[in-house]
Amino acid sequence: MVRRLWSDGVLLAVLIACVWWPLATGGAPGGASKARVDLRSPKYLHYKQEYRRNLLSNGLGVTPPMGWNSWNHFACAVNETIIRETADAMVSTGLSKLGYEYVNIDDCWAEIARDYNGNLVAKNTTFPSGIKALADYVHGKGLKLGIYSDAGYFTCSKTMPGSLRREEQDAKTFASWGIDYLKYDNCNNDGTKPTVRYPIMTRALMKAGRPIFFSLCEWGDLHPALWGAKLGNSWRTTNDISDTWDSIMSRADLNEPYAELARPGGWNDPDMLEIGNGGMMKHEYVVHFSIWAISKAPLLLGCDIRNLDKDTAEIISNKEVIAVNQDSLGIQAKKVRSEGDQEVWAGPLTGYRVAVLLVNRGTYRYTVIAHWDDIGLPLDTVVEARDIWEHKTLKNTFVRNITATVDAHSCKMYILKPVS
Ligand code: GAL
């Protein structure tokens, strides 16, 4: 609200300076008359529109991004062989056909020193062929290449420079290499707010001559959901995830209150997936994937997809769950009810359908009920329910509620489709 008043105040000042003042002082566009100015007139609308213009209009992220990122599994031990083999695996495993397209290099890919002209340089020992060659390779597979930098002097690992005060130069470098996605971190900065430093990179990317998905990684410190949509295609709402049940569930909780601020072109990001990294049980990873999918979170795999085990492949390849994430309505589900450890998450889908997730966070089996008035269906709606982990449409139809017995640390996920 304060922000709104503030921005409206600035808008008014801009309008007064640009429109009223020249008119009142005789320097008006189209004449020296001192006629009263109606700022609501369509004639002046473009000033307003110009002021409110989104800094970022790259047309990307119409649905949440899907792909892979090196950090969760490899951290600083990433190299070009891993990136090439990951791109190969993305295609050979069939993941690319399911929509996974970005292959993203995280921290530690560059030399600590820039070159003679101040350009970033790929680390010679780990990326000897350079990033352009890697981008060509990844593009040759029909995929996209992402990279990582930081709105500070050094990245979080401190093994390479950040882009602070080099935004335009680095954005141009990324574009010239053929980069398609930039994750922009927040470490080792100059102490100014992210709302000062991030827009500089947004503008630089818009000028760089290539559409680059812009992922703000500010960890949720300054509620980026409130300002991120004008600057980026996604914004982290949490600090770093780890491969444990408590970590994924707390990240889900931190991300959920911002549900209404997600929309096509700009998504809340509760961090990358840990499925397949070995720290959790299969049913827990199923909950992880389900919550990320229904929350319209970026689906960025974080395991070694060159060596997928059967369970991991099954979870991340579930077409019906992916379709919930990629539904064109782009509305993030909310946790509509929680009673103790039992939770109901729900969100609308195209075609008057509703995605419902019944989660049992507890350590005993429980019955979980989703009531129509909680999930946004008129009470007398009769629905067909499709269990999208079992891949079965249930025999009965349902009215008023749907109930399931849910095991510990497990979930049931349905798509409800009105039949009356
Ligand atoms: C963190 C970020 C992680 C990863 C790491 C690299 O700040 O949240 O996702 O990018 O830096 O050092």
Image (cartoon, grey):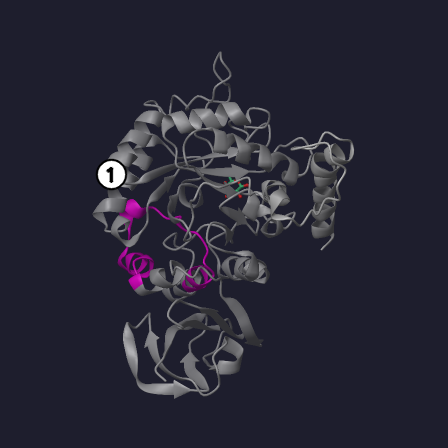
Quadrant that contains the N terminus: bottom right
On screen, 377 above or below 247?
A: below
Which residue in the structure is indicated by mark 1? 141
Q: Is residue 108 found left or right of 223 in the rendered image?
A: left
What range of the chain is rendered magenta? 290-319
**Does residue 389 show up?**
yes
Residue at the spot 47% in from the left edge and 15% down from the top edge: 115
| Mark 1 vs ligand 1: CB below 8 Å | no
**Does residue 157 show up?**
no
User: Would residue 201 be counted in the magenta stretch?
Assistant: no
Q: Secondary structure at mark 1?
A: loop
On screen, 6 above or below 32?
A: below
Q: Position of residue 360 (x, y in %)?
A: 48, 74
User: Would residue 307 be counted in the magenta stretch?
Assistant: yes
Residue at the spot 54% in from the left edge and 33% down from the top edge: 203
Which residue is nearer to you in this view: 207 or 321? 207
Which residue is nearer to you in this view: 282 or 318? 318
On screen, 400 above or below 120?
A: below
Q: Amino acid at mark 1?
A: Lys
| Count of marks overlaid on the render | 1
Residue at the spot 51% in from the left edge and 28% down from the top edge: 159
Q: Position of residue 412 (x, y in %)?
A: 40, 74
Q: Dot 1: within a 10 Å radius of its alpha carbon, few (fewer than 14), some, or many (20 or more) residues?
A: some
Q: Position of residue 294 (x, y in %)?
A: 44, 64
Q: Residue furthest top?
A: 116
